Image (cartoon, helix red, strand yellow):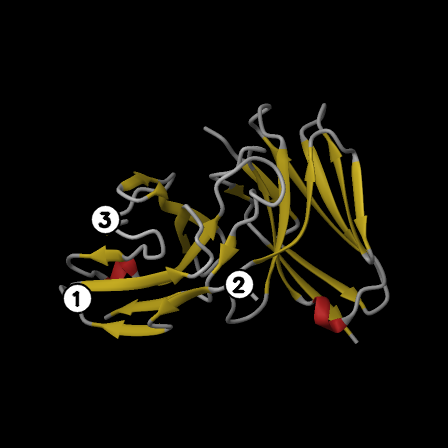
Amino acid sequence: GENVEQHPSTLSVQEGDSAVIKCTYSDSASNYFPWYKQELGKGPQLIIDIRSNVGEKKDQRIAVTLNKTAKHFSLHITETQPEDSAVYFCAAGYNQGGKLIFGQGTELSVKP
Amino acid sequence: EADIYQTPRYLVIGTGKKITLECSQTMGHDKMYWYQQDPGMELHLIHYSYGVNSTEKGDLSSESTVSRIRTEHFPLTLESARPSHTSQYLCASSPLGTGSPYNEQFFGPGTRLTVL
């Protein structure tokens, strides 16, 4: 069935360093790839997304890249800050909306 | 801040009890979802609905049931709770349509269920 693999499961960086989280997906028909951030005690919140007609998208310190041929996409956070500490999820879905298949999550810790 | 609410936030209950987890949204979204989140973080879709009187089972088999009688309300029920049902349950919603902003799922804060 459809599957999304996410790595690493935990990531620890120093404040100011960059963090990269990678995901691969199995369904070649997927064309929508969001990233969610989940803080302690809260539900996940969308931080950035990318569609299959775009290779890269940037929003301030976060960027996402997509390689549709290889079926993988990545989240890049630059100049990390302690408030970036959270669990990050990638997901794959379709442009017409509906179900998302989530990755296993990455617990990011930014040390001051 | 998304207008999607879950009650209760925490529930500790004994084995065999019937429970209902409430989820409501005020955004008029047609699509709603229930996820079960492991202690190890992974999110598993257990139920979804694309409109009133429409419900489907998700990718993870669950003994829970759902109903969608009103657009804004999507409760989840366990007829007889067991310790294996102990988990975090997250409700989400998204609008009907194609492309941005129709893909985004808005999540509630979750209900943490413990069955003794």
Mark 3 falls within which chain? B
Taking the image as shown, residue B115 lies to the left or right of residue B104, namely left
Q: Amino acid at mark 1?
A: Thr
Mark 2 falls within which chain? B
Residue at screen point 29% across, 63% down? B21
Of the numbered discs 3 and 2, the one sitting upstream in the chain is 2
Label 1 SS: loop
Q: Position of residue A16 (x, y in %)?
A: 86, 66
Q: Is residue A8 above or below residue A26?
A: below
Dots 1 and 2 on the same chain: yes
Residue at screen point 52% across, 34% down? A3
* Residue on which disc 2 sits: B2
Query: Toward the viewer: B26 or A94?
Result: B26
* Residue on which disc 3 sits: B63
Of the numbered discs 3 and 1, the one sitting upstream in the chain is 1
Query: Toward the viewer: B97 or A45?
Result: B97
Give the alpha-carbon distance from disc 3 to disc 1, as whole Å: 14 Å
Q: Position of residue B31 (x, y in %)?
A: 42, 45
Tell me the tag on residue B27: none
Mark toward the viewer: 3 or 1 = 3
* Residue on which disc 1 sits: B15
Of the numbered discs 1 and 2, the one sitting upstream in the chain is 2
Label 3 SS: loop
Q: Position of residue B73 (x, y in %)?
A: 32, 57
Query: Toward the viewer: B96 or A56?
Result: B96
Mark toward the viewer: 3 or 2 = 2
- The answer to which image quadrant residue A55 occupies is top right
Mark 1 falls within which chain? B
- The answer to which image quadrant residue A73 occupies is top right
Question: 10 Å neighbourhood of mark 2: few (<14), some, or many (≥20)?
Answer: some
Q: Amino acid at mark 3?
A: Glu
